[in-house]
Amino acid sequence: MRIAPFRIAGIGCRPGTSMDLLATALQAAGGAQALATIPERAPEIRPLAAALDLPLHLVAVAGIDTPTQSPRILARFRTGSVAEAAALAASRTRGGRLIQPRRAFGPVTIAIAEVP
């Protein structure tokens, strides 16, 4: 019997983004078994993680190379995509890889990493 891979959703969002918008975006992205973001977005993401009973990884993203690049995000956080960098940072120590680059859902971006 094959065990399904573990999916980690890296999430970026604008400050003050509602939990409803975050939950809708996560569902549209295919869901995950864990969430990851930067400490600055913990106030937005923590309630979602608690409501879904998912672990939340708060990670540093500066210097992480990402497949996509936003000049605004690069200037502010020193990475091309908060969502991609968060997913990679949270999964890297367990051999994870990015399986879905960032997708925008209004003020929310989500990227998915998979851990074997």
Image (cartoon, helix red, strand yellow):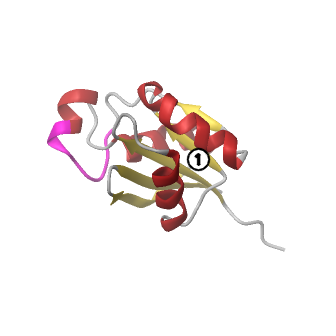
Q: Quadrant of the C terminus?
A: bottom right
In magenta segment, residue 51 = no
Give residue 75's position: percent from left, percent from top.
Answer: 17, 30
Residue drawn at (40%, 45%) of the image: 83
Q: Which residue is mark 1?
A: 95
Q: Is residue 1 above or below residue 113?
A: below
Nearest the viewer among 89 and 75 is: 75
Query: For numbered disc 1, what is the local secondary structure?
Result: loop
- Residues drawn in magenta: 65-72
In magenta segment, residue 71 = yes
Q: Main secondary structure of the magenta part?
A: loop
Residue drawn at (48%, 46%) of the image: 10
Which residue reaches farthest bottom? 1
Residue drawn at (58%, 34%) of the image: 46
Residue drawn at (72%, 66%) of the image: 4
Give residue 109's position: percent from left, percent from top.
Answer: 37, 51
